[in-house]
Image: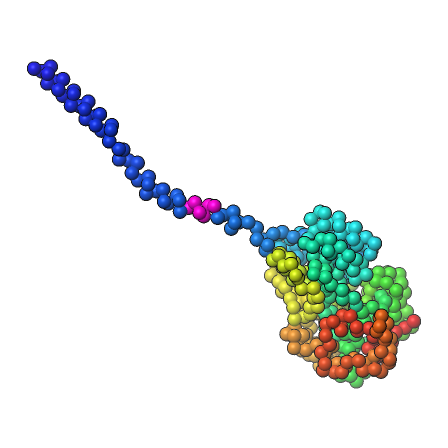
Amino acid sequence: MNKKFYLLLLTLVLASLFVAACQPAAEPAPAPTEAPAVATEAPAATEAPAATEAPAEAEGATLAIEHFSIIEGTTWSGAHDRAGKRIAEKYDNVDYVYREEVGPDLTVPYAEELIADGADIVVGNAEFMGLPLKDIADKYPDVYFVSIIASDLTTKRNFIRLFPRQYQALYLEGLVAGALTETGNIGIVSAFPSGQVIRRQAGFVLGVQDAAEMLGKDVNVYVKYAGDWYLPQEERDIAATLVDQYKVDVLTQQTDSGSPLDVATEKGVWFVGKDMDIVGFYGWSNTDTVAISFDTRWEVLYDQIVQEWLAGEKNPETVLYLGMDSSMTLADGTEVATVDIMNDNKVGVDAISPKALPMIPQEIVDLVAQRREQMMKGEWDPFTEHAFISNGTGLELEGLPIPDKGTEVKPAGEEPTAEWLLGEFNFDLEGTQVLE
């Protein structure tokens, strides 16, 4: 009987195990509820590549500048080189590369080498050697080509022309120079007659004349041409001639070597700098000689071009003529205008040499501060304010002779167009004495 009982018990246990094995498993039931959670993540995963595809603004760029001269020891190419470096410092995805001493015959070959190495924006930093870039603009439609404007305004969809309104800062320099001169003679060591030289000298001359009128002075502005931008010995000889023969006691330049500054230092006359803060950035001379300089921040113009390229703009703005009312913020947070008066790392009236400042009447200092502030706000401009009276000298352009001496080409209070200033302003202002 016991055996029968155990056999029956064993049979019941085996039967229950068999039935349990045939039932659906209870544990996997939660799996279907988790499946939608996985499924809802899936679209995000498939869309991720589209979201992380590098948009135009996130792509890198290489800015390549072809410098017409050497960089070291020059203010023009030195300022362009500093601009390239500042752009690369501001943007993690922008590189700066360059070539030096590029003549017109090398512009295109070097540009094509730079493009082959990855350049996206190629700049010729002078008109005479930058213009050949237009000939290859169509060949490389995805590259921006850039050239300085002297007087030619040729553009293409991807061939950009630029120049800063340096004449605004030069006007402020002229106010300082006109106040400082005691002999009444100011000299300019200049390169050669060209649109950009004439524009810049005009701004300086207007400042000198305004200071002279305010102070009741008779002031002469002498200009003598060296024949090119970078001729150190010729520039030295001209500077010495201006001081020794013409009794100049304030000297400036529209050339690129440090020779005129050397002469000013040696002969104990005031010097007014161009293109860069030569004391603060280069350590050239000191504020015992350099009364004031103007600083050109080409990076403000390059910044606009770089931003358009990074944004994928196929039709960028092709003529940039920015002035003191345009600015950019550098990598270190400093805001800089396109041009400004600057000396020993100071800007505005603080840039006037501490040695020169006591020699300048307060009314001139106040006027420098006032006009600078107005130009920063875009409320005043010397080229709008003043009449343009021809001196009868300048540069005859094709179909555009130099206006006769005494001709009023533009009345006071009329704003000249950017195109006219850049392409047709071909005469010196009355009162400029051009020496042979």
Choose top left, top right, bottom left or bottom right for residue 413. Answer: bottom right
* Residue in the image at 37% along x and 45% along y: 37
Whether residue 90 sits left or right of residue 182 in the image: it is left
Say whether residue 47 is magenta: no
Read off the magenta span: 41-46
Whether residue 237 sits left or right of residue 114 in the image: it is right
* 228 vs 110: above or below: below
Dominant secondary structure of the residues highlighted in magenta in the image: helix
* Residue in the image at 76% along x and 77% along y: 207
Locate residue 35, reporting x and y percent. Answer: 36, 42
Locate residue 39, reporting x and y percent. Answer: 39, 44
Q: Nearer the viewer, residue 157 or 199?
A: 157
Locate residue 372, reporting x and y percent. Answer: 68, 74
Quarter of the figure that contains the N terminus = top left
Residue 372 visible, this angle: yes
Quarter of the figure that contains the C terminus = bottom right
Whether residue 334 sits left or right of residue 248 in the image: it is left
